[in-house]
Image (cartoon, rainbow, N blue to C red):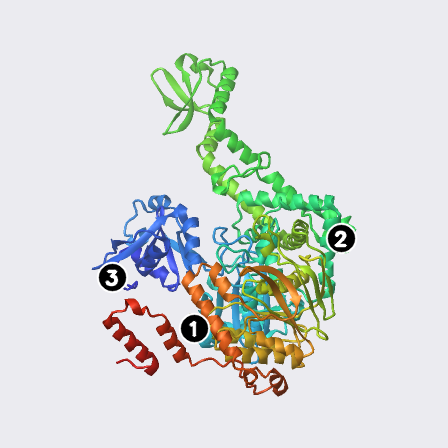
Amino acid sequence: MSTTKDKGLTPMMRQFFSLKAKHPDALMLFRCGDFYETYCDDAIEASRILGITLTKRNNGASVGSEMAGFPHHALDTYLPKLIRAGKRVAICDQLEDPKKKREAIKGKKGLTEMDKMVKRGITELVTPGVAMSDNVLNYKENNFLAAVHFGKTSCGVSFLDISTGEFLTGQGSYDYVEKLLGNFSPKEVLYDRDRKADFERYFGTRYCVFELDDWVFTDQSARQKLLKHFGTKNLKGFGVDYLKDGVIAAGAIMQYLEITQHTHINHITSLKRLEEEKYVRLDKFTIRSLELLQPMQDDGTSLLGVIDRTVTPMGGRLLRRWMVFPLKDVRQIADRQDVVDYFFKQPDFRHLVDEQLHRVGDLERIISKVAVGRVSPREVVQLKHALMAVQPIKTACLYAENASLRRLGEQLNLCESLRDRIEKEIQPDPPLLVNKGNVIAHGYSQELDDLRSISRNGKDYLLHIQQDESEKTGITSLKVGFNNVFGYYLEVRNTFKDKVPETWIRKQTLAQAERYITPELKEYEEKILGADEKILDLEVRLYSELIVAMQEFIPQIQINANLLAHIDCLLGFAKVSEDNLYVRPEVDEGDVIDILQGRHPVIETQMPLGERYVPNDVYLDTEKQQVMMITGPNMAGKSALLRQTALIVLLAQIGCFVPAERAKIGLVDKIFTRVGASDNLSLGESTFMVEMTEAADILNNVSPRSLVLFDELGRGTSTYDGISIAWAIVEYLHEHPKARARTLFATHYHELNEMEKNFPRIKNYNVSVKEVDGKVIFLRKLVRGGSEHSFGIHVAEIAGMPRSIVKRSQVILKQLEADNASVGSAGKPNTERLADSREGMQMSIFQLDDPVLSQVRDEILGLDINNLTPVEALNKLNEIKKIVTGKSQ
């Protein structure tokens, strides 16, 4: 790319490169008249992402340069596409009015070409993690910027959503930070450029990242930034002072805001500590496999999609947070459940709150826009409506027969003075932009009202002056006129010249008349000639004064937004619980998970018309039934049973009611799942490698309070390997004193049913089926005892597998079962020996024919001898020889 030193460049391109050098890593949108233009490499990238035409322009040098652009008014359409593509975008605007610039330099000599150029400057640097535009943001999802600091003994992490002002920090192990990054899903992550290898090693390459210099990640620099912003002597008041690495990460975020020119940030009013011990641990595998936030299939539904009945954007964002941070405190859970219960029992209260919440809108992001001075007139009116809605909600909560609701009501701030001021100063239905005019309400400013009257009623006012002066003087032929030389005038015919008052000033003599001006007419002239421009300037000034005054209310309104979001979530729980017949679970400090007639909250909403979900009971504890070994055929519902148990526990611990007839949930500290098959080929990880990585993560972090779900573990390798690994893992969970987690283990390895005989807390269950006339009917009911059949061939048949393959599979299955049965007692799996050895297990479960000979047999059986030509026979014989020798001839 060319530089500003290129003497052949045009003045405008020199200006472009000069500004581009300030942020070389950002794609720059360069304002030229009515267009935003991109040049050189930026143009190539913009053309690819936005689908706009790539052209060439002569930049004054010996070669042309690439160019692509779009109309300036389409910025809100194209900017989000660039940000979602992970681009940092520098917006370069014209800092002068081109018309005024031309007038200013008119007639001046000795000016260079650069002097004649309209001044431009970068007014904003928009990045994926620092975005305020509604077109970029998802209204029910936070837009977090994160920073990671690699400390000596721990790793610091911080999160900021500049669109809401929420600022969080914490520190811990790499595993803990990796979990937080997964749960918060930041749109951009900052780290020390010298630690790139460490970042990718511990956190992968899936995040949009930006590298900063090492001096940003120093304790002195970080604390200086934070103390200056908050105006405090230390950080003790925020409870984060001792989190050295977390504070450094938070300071790096503040430095980044300065780099990206986001300096109006007084809506960031506090820094909160992330408290690991308060929440259930959910790793990224569990969040994904349980489909908490996103479905795995495009046409699927997530748990969030089912239970989200919030009506405010901030309620939706808070619910998303609650989903990945379930509570571990029984009292807090009960407080939430009490409020949900109150909504059930008090329909009038519920209806009032629901009605008012629909009037609130995105209070949190509106007040953040006030802080940065980007709030629109319509959003200001929406803020007024939200504050008006707070009044009845506050009153209703104060009189509620629920302590939690009364506390919420006490904390809600009516901000009456602000609400009244908006009502007084802003039109009820203003335009979206202040520069469109008609924003300030009539009656607020006498000066503005006069200007509007002049602008709208100019001719009437002139007629009024004409009539008034005519009556005073008796000049019946008096006329008001205008010319470009001396403006408005009064024209008097010569016959009435003697009646002209002495205060009138003669400006022009004509053949039949004379023209005069008066102080009143001159005063009006000054008003009417610049009325529209003055109206706009005055409206902008009055509006700006209101916005500045609104900034004093930022902390109170942020508290309101948080409280309303809290109420919205709990009201949503009541709605979904009533609609889907959920019940209040009993959550305690015990170790029993006892679910009667539990249902899968997502699947039951997707059932075909006329069908209903088959509920099941699940009981787990750490004394009698710690591990439920679940067998059964494919498609019988084992995976659904595992997932529904985890989802019921999770719903209970976020304070929601659950899909069951009754549920008792002994607090869970961690939920682990190893469900389904997936790979990570981009990192060279096979399906089995991913499976073992996830299993290792579970076993390295499990505790006796955990809930563990294993589904089809070990299916990605040979039968012997798979059974050996599965057996050893179940044995470890049962025997290890630091493990002993409540576990659901679904498997097709029927051999694992033998474990029940030797491990007292392992109990066998199966999801039952019924076979009628060779067809399998899935009853989807969990019953005691193990199962010996998988019915995989039946599943293949109903999936549409070619009939010939299904028949051939049945033949092979019968042969294998016969061969295995003929082995006799010598070939039976010695499960007692397995249980006793506990280590170094050796199993001889199957004794199959030589696979090579089996393949030869299949080749011969498949021959159609009657229709085989001599040449085909020789070729087939050669193929069989290759199978036997393993060599090509």
Give the mark nearer the N terminus: 1 vs 3. 3
Judge left or right: residue 16 versus residue 76.
left
**Nearest to viewer (mark 2 / mark 1):** 1
Q: For numbered disc 2, what is the local secondary structure?
A: helix
Question: Residue 120's quadrant in the figure?
Answer: bottom left
Give the amino acid at mark 3. Lys
Give the amino acid at mark 2. Arg
In the rendered image, the vertical position of residue 509 relative to residue 101, given as above or below: above
Q: Where is residue 805 in the image (x, y as percent from the top left)?
A: 42, 65
Q: Which mark is residue 406?
A: 2
For the residues marked 1 and 3, what is the alpha-carbon distance in whole angstroms?
Answer: 47 Å
Residue at numbered disc 3: 7
Residue at numbered disc 1: 683
Q: Where is residue 87 in the image (x, y as percent from the top left)?
A: 41, 60
Of 528 and 32, the residue lying toward us: 32
Q: Residue furthest left?
A: 62
Q: For numbered disc 1, what is the local secondary structure?
A: helix
Give the mark nearer the N terminus: 2 vs 1. 2
For the residues marked 3 and 2, what is the alpha-carbon distance in whole angstroms?
Answer: 72 Å
Q: Residue furthest top?
A: 495
Q: Where is residue 366 in the image (x, y as percent from the top left)?
A: 57, 50
For the residues marked 2 and 1, what is the alpha-carbon distance in whole angstroms?
Answer: 53 Å
Q: Quarter holding the C terminus? A: bottom left
In the rendered image, the vertical position of residue 168 relative to residue 623, given as above or below: above
Q: How crowded is mark 3: few (under 14 residues within 10 Å), some or many (20 or more)?
A: few
Q: Which mark is residue 573?
A: none
* Total residue callouts: 3
